[in-house]
Amino acid sequence: MRRRRALAAVTALAGTATAGLTSSQTGNDRLLSVARTPGEGGEASTSTERLLPGTVHETPLYAIESHRDGPTAMVFGGIHGDERSGIRVAHEVADWHPDAGTIVVVPETNRVAVENDTRRGTSGDLNRQFPGDESPTTSLAAGIWDAVERYDPDVVLDLHRSLGIYGLHREYVGQVVFHSAAARGKPLVDALNDDAVPWYLPFHRFTAQESTAGGPLLFQKAAHELDAATYLFETTEFLLNQATRTQQARLVTAHVLALHGLLEFEQAPANSTPSNTQAKTAADSTETSSETRADS
Amino acid sequence: MTASSDPNAEPVSHPQERELRTSPFLLVRRALTSPVTIATYILLVVPFALGWLKTELFSPLALPGYVLYSVGTAIGNALAPRFEFWVYWIPFLGSCYGLAVSVGAGCEWLRVRSVGTEPEGTKSADEQRRRL
């Protein structure tokens, strides 16, 4: 009897591990390869500048300009210093290649908080320091806002991580894309759920929430004063490991850029690859899968 | 030749056996440790625990445990918001066992009922004892 029970337990373990591995989401390698590989126009040109130079908040900003005109998108990571998935993805985005327009990325927006691995930096929660129709309330926020005004983005994406799930855990806002009225929140979460959330994790499906403009958050101020399409992305630590959170942040960034025309990508039917991305996919597939393994 | 191996043996009715069948103590004991209970418990806990250890190992088999744990954290978070989520493993394991015992008890009850409704004499006493 004991042997039979042990056998049943081992079978259950092996079965569930196999089921997990075979049914896990594969992401969207094709979209990510479009983002990582130069398009037909060739390499994008990247320029780097330092925000708030000579201060403890000094942090790099990367502007990656395509050869074709197009919208400007700004991507922020590290507004909260302990939300590593956004920081990591923002660093990756500095090496991406837009097919049109310009990607401006600030990977470690609140550098002191990032270095201390804390939510807040030296002067409180940075993402409450951008009141609408008023000046930013701290020197760090003012320095960031100055860069935002200079680049005058059409699209803003702010990457975050929560501890729980919005609607399930009262205090938390995970698995939500907050967006401005001008943004495309619904198609974004549809694409994200298709790529990144398996059906058997129903509470982890992303929802789109339109946010009122004029609040003290960076994405709200950008929507209110610059009429930009803005997004605040929140993944969750609840039952998701770092690799999964990073993959979700990576996918939302790529989808935002694609939805606003910075990446040339169309969702193709299964088993077909557009000719202009075929070479990119082949070249990048090894890198993508090896990175996924390294993340895990 | 014994009664159990003789197909023509007279059906034997054992009062002790009937008592055993319906004894609440025995039924509870069997429900707590029956193979069905243990299998249900393993199914609820193991696939979910694997996914909890490594997200990539979540599978459709983890769905019942996932729902149970998530709803538990939602209730716990509404009642006492400051607890970290790992704390809910304790009530989760307890409620999984409770559910598994309910399933096990249900199976035991069905089994005893089916034995009890079988016409007397269709099984030998020895067979019935073995099934208990």
Image (spheres, coloured by chain):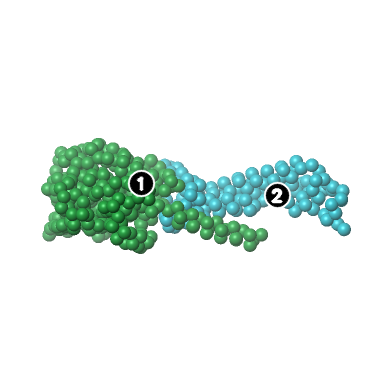
Q: As shown in the figure, which amino acid type bears the numbered disc 2? A: Leu
Q: As shown in the figure, which amino acid type bears the numbered disc 1? A: Pro
Secondary-structure class at tag 2:
helix
Q: Say which residue label 1 marks.
A: A269
Question: If the image is split into quadrants, where does the N terminus of chain A sit?
Answer: bottom right
Q: Is residue B75 left or right of residue A272?
A: right
- Percent position (x, y) of residue A159? 27, 50
Q: CA distance from mark 1 to mark 2?
A: 59 Å
Image colour assigned to chain B: cyan
Q: Chain of mark 2?
A: B
- The answer to whether residue B7 of the structure is visible from this angle is yes
Residue A83 — which label? none
Relative vertical location of residue A283 with respect to residue A203 in this rendering, above or below: below
Q: Is residue A169 left or right of residue B109?
A: left
Residue shown at 29% from the left, 40% from the top: A185
**Letter of the chain shown green in the rendering:** A
- Pointer 2 local density, CA inside 10 Å: few below 14, some 14–19, many at least 20: some
Foreground tag (1 vs 2): 1
Q: Is residue A90 left or right of residue A193?
A: left
- Pointer 1 local density, CA inside 10 Å: few below 14, some 14–19, many at least 20: few
Secondary-structure class at tag 1:
loop
Residue shown at 18% from the left, 54% from the top: A41
- Percent position (x, y) of residue A210? 28, 38
- The answer to whether residue A173 of the structure is visible from this angle is no
Relative vertical location of residue B32 with respect to residue A286 in this rendering, above or below: above
Front residue of this view, candidates A162 and B78: A162
Q: Chain of mark 1?
A: A
Residue B26 — which label? 2
Number of marks in the rendered image: 2
